[in-house]
Amino acid sequence: MNLSLCCISNILAEQGYKFRTMTYKSFSSKEREESLEKLSGIVINNFNVSEKIVRHCAANNIKGYRLSSDLCPVIKHPDVMIGLEDLPNYSDIEESIKDLSAAIKETGIRVSAHPSEYITLTSDDPIKVQHSIIDLELHAEIFERLSLERSYYNPLNIHIRKEGDAKELCDTFISNYNKLSTSVKSRLVLENNDTGNTWTVANLKKYFFEPYGIPVTFDNLHHNMLNHGVSHKDAFFEAYLTWNCTPIFHYSEGKNGTRAHRDMGEDLPINYNKDVLFDVELKGKDYAILDILKRYNDRKITTVD
């Protein structure tokens, strides 16, 4: 059972290894130089915590790690708009990135990211699209700095957020997709939605994989909420066959049949005897993963062919 931790380690957080952030309101409340100094420290902390989490994953048989999407907060806000190299103590930032890169290489942990839920390449608002492109490019820059593959092995996972005519939305998406760098496009994958009525696995495959080769991420909980009568198994395989490497799929369980994530799981991910890495989105984070691994190892799973 190959499982991946999403962003935060609850175990390490209890030991004081926590991510820090900064809002634009906080940044703008002080003199710019003072805020930049503070922001630099936040970025260094966040890369250092990420390194600690990667090594923690490796030590606990957790095979993957989804990087936080807020490692470098506020730097691409329209009224800030700076690069990492513009921050004070840049050499220390570089060192923290190198340490994280070395940890990933040494441990073999597979890394991915799920950029902000506000990312949209289908909006009619060019400003929203531009902000989305800037955010995606920042994620890709971090991946490049970490020496991660330009491939779906290290994916950037997003949603199609807008509802409407699927073909028209696809055309809008591709028009904006073509504005992205190769660094982004070579990693970008699309996840099935849990709301609306349009973006099931089947429609993502039809409109984005078949004509453009963009892989589909299967999220089991989202599928439970929106499936158009397609079975879990059929949707799983539809998504599975869109990948040219081991897929990263998402696993969670809803509270009382809802889309709200449980803290801890009661079931186990189903992989139909296929090689899959599951991002575990249960709120218990690594506690939930370790519980799944224990339950998986304590009993023989009935496989589903």
Image (spheres, rainbow, N blue to C red):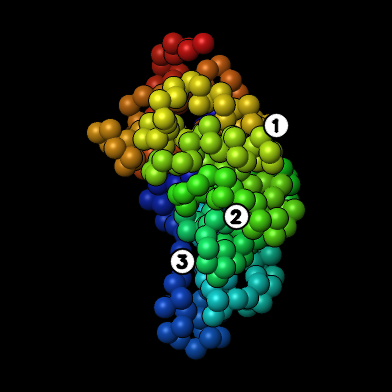
Residue that sits furthest to the left in the current view: 256
| Residue 248, image x, y percentages | 57, 35
The secondary structure type at the circle numbered 3 is loop
Q: Residues within 10 Å of mark 1 (few under 14, many from 20)?
A: few
In the rendered image, the vertical position of residue 93 relative to residue 276, given as above or below: below
Mark 3 vs mark 1, foreground winner is 1
Q: Which numbered disc flags the more N-terminal residue, 1 or 2?
A: 2
| Residue 23, image x, y percentages | 44, 72
Q: CA–CA distance between discs 3 and 2?
A: 33 Å
The secondary structure type at the circle numbered 1 is loop
Which residue is rendered at x = 48% and y = 12% of the image?
303
- Label 3 is placed on what type of residue? Thr
- Label 2 is placed on what type of residue? Thr
- Label 1 is placed on what type of residue? Asn
Pointer 3 residue: 21
Pointer 1 residue: 244
Q: Residues within 10 Å of mark 2 (few under 14, many from 20)?
A: some
